């Protein structure tokens, strides 16, 4: 099939494509001057997400500049709470802010029916990108996993260790379960709409999976992910889903075995163990320390080469262990792409 000429899709189909395809989490963003210019033109980050023309352009910027193997839709995991009617704003220089949701009464104010109308411009962005994307480049859609999204909805912001959500899950399990159920449904609906608009791959970001206490891991991380994967695959069995449960250590084995994800994204702290210990047919993505990309030079080269040599022979997608950070020099990204393409071709 023509689509399978795309290295990203071949790797996700289980082929040990070499050199491996490469894209970077948070590849569109503040480290790029051309992003900062459009962000300024749009006004705010949310205005940029909801301006399909500018969001499509921002999606394409890193693909054009670096020749990456995938574009990731420009949006945010917090557009789901926003779509459900929760107040969301991004104060300049700070992180996201939401009106916290902490009680069963707050949940009754959420409007699941408002989700698709509110996020409609994001689906328009998908169509615009799809129409002009180079044919060898894959298009990735995404959502936050319910646990990670819930941590922001409950605390109203990012907090150290996401303590407010951990506490809510313990002290008010009925409230937490009800929120979880709303998020499983809304996330599924949002992802199906992205697929119908044209994305070819889904990534589920569970940035805060590593903060869940072990006895709640199954209920808060595994089960909601499995439900979403099952529902998406029921409608679209062939769309690959990359799970990214960040910093979960050796629980990644259980995650990979029991959620039904097509591929496992790994943080820098989990990468070497995962590449060594997890079955060779499992598709793995990521693992490079974002700080190595900031540092560049010999450090970047050493880290990248080490990952390449460990991943050789299995289906692997080159990526970071978390997102590109704003202080990253863009030329280091170009250097990394060269290392992966050239070094990968040699070893
Ligand atoms: O990867 C991409 O380039 C696509 C777009 C994308 C953004 N956010 C744009 C964004 C993606 C995939 C995300 C995911 C996301 N958003 C996650 C999961 C991945 C991760 O990094 O852990 C999380 C936890 C969020 C929530 C969020 N959005 C936070 C905490 C912040 C502020 C701090 C930060 O990391 O930048 C955002 C804002 C945000 N999302 C920006 C961008 C480009 C910066 C906005 C700006 O221009 O000021």
Image: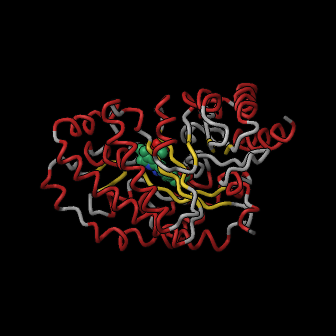
Q: Nearer the viewer, residue 113 or 157?
A: 113
Q: Position of residue 71 (x, y in %)?
A: 63, 58
- Relative horizontal placement of residue 103, taking residue 188 as reference (left or right): left
Q: Is residue 321 or residue 196 the one in the foreground?
A: 196
Q: Nearer the viewer, residue 330 or 9?
A: 9
Instruction: Please tell me in which quadrant of the rendered image residue 219 appears.
Output: top left
Kindly tell me whether residue 156 is visible in this rendering: yes
Q: Residue at x 41, y 59 (%)?
A: 46
Residue shown at 46% from the left, 47% from the top: 259
Where does the N terminus fall, quadrant-wise? bottom right
Residue 56 in the image: x percent, y percent? 57, 66
Measured as percent of width and height from the top left, residue 309 is found at 76, 31
Position of 312 compared to 325: left or right? Answer: right
Quarter of the rendering containing residue 330: top right
Provide residue 267's location: percent of width, then percent of height.
54, 34
Q: Residue at x 54, y 54 (%)?
A: 241
**Which residue ends up furthest to the right in the rendered image?**
346
Q: Name the image colouring.
A: secondary structure
Q: Quadrant of the C terminus?
A: top right
Q: Is residue 44 visible?
A: no
Q: Residue at x 31, y 35 (%)?
A: 216
**Residue 94 vertical placement versus 54 (above, below):** above
- Kindly give the residue lying farthest to the left in the view shown: 105
């Amino acid at each position: 099939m023509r689509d399978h000429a795309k290295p990203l899709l071949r790797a996700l189909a289980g082929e040990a494509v070499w050199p491996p395809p490469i894209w970077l989490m948070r590849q569109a963003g503040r480290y790029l001057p051309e992003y900062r210019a459009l962000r300024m033109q749009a006004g705010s980050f949310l205005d940029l997400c909801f301006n399909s023309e500018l969001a499509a352009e921002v999606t394409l910027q890193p693909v054009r500049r670096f020749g990456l193997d995938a574009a990731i839709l420009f949006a945010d995991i917090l557009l789901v709470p926003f779509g459900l009617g929760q107040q969301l704003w991004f104060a300049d220089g700070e992180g996201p802010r939401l009106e916290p949701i902490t009680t069963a009464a707050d949940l009754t104010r959420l409007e699941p029916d408002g989700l698709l109308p509110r996020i409609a411009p994001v689906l328009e962005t998908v169509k615009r990108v799809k129409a002009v994307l180079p044919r060898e480049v894959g298009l990735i859609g995404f959502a936050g996993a319910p646990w990670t999204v819930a941590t922001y909805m409950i605390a109203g912001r990012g907090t150290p260790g996401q303590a407010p959500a951990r506490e809510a899950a313990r002290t008010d399990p009925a409230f937490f379960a009800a929120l979880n159920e709303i998020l499983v449904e809304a996330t599924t609906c949002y992802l199906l709409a992205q697929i119908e608009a044209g994305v070819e791959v889904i990534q589920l970001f569970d940035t805060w999976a590593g903060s869940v206490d072990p006895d709640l891991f199954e209920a808060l991380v595994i089960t909601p992910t499995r439900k979403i994967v099952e529902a998406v695959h029921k409608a679209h069995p062939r769309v690959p889903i990359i799970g990214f449960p960040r910093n979960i250590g050796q629980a990644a084995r259980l995650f990979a075995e029991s959620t039904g994800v097509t591929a496992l994204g790994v943080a820098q702290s989990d990468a070497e163990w995962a590449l060594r210990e997890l079955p060779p047919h499992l598709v793995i993505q990521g693992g490079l320390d974002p700080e190595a990309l900031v540092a560049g030079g010999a450090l970047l080269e050493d880290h990248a080469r080490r990952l390449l040599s460990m991943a050789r022979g299995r289906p692997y997608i080159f990526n970071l262990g978390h997102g590109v950070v704003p202080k990253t020099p863009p030329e280091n990204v170009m250097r990394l792409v060269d290392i992966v393409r050239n070094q990968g071709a040699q070893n």
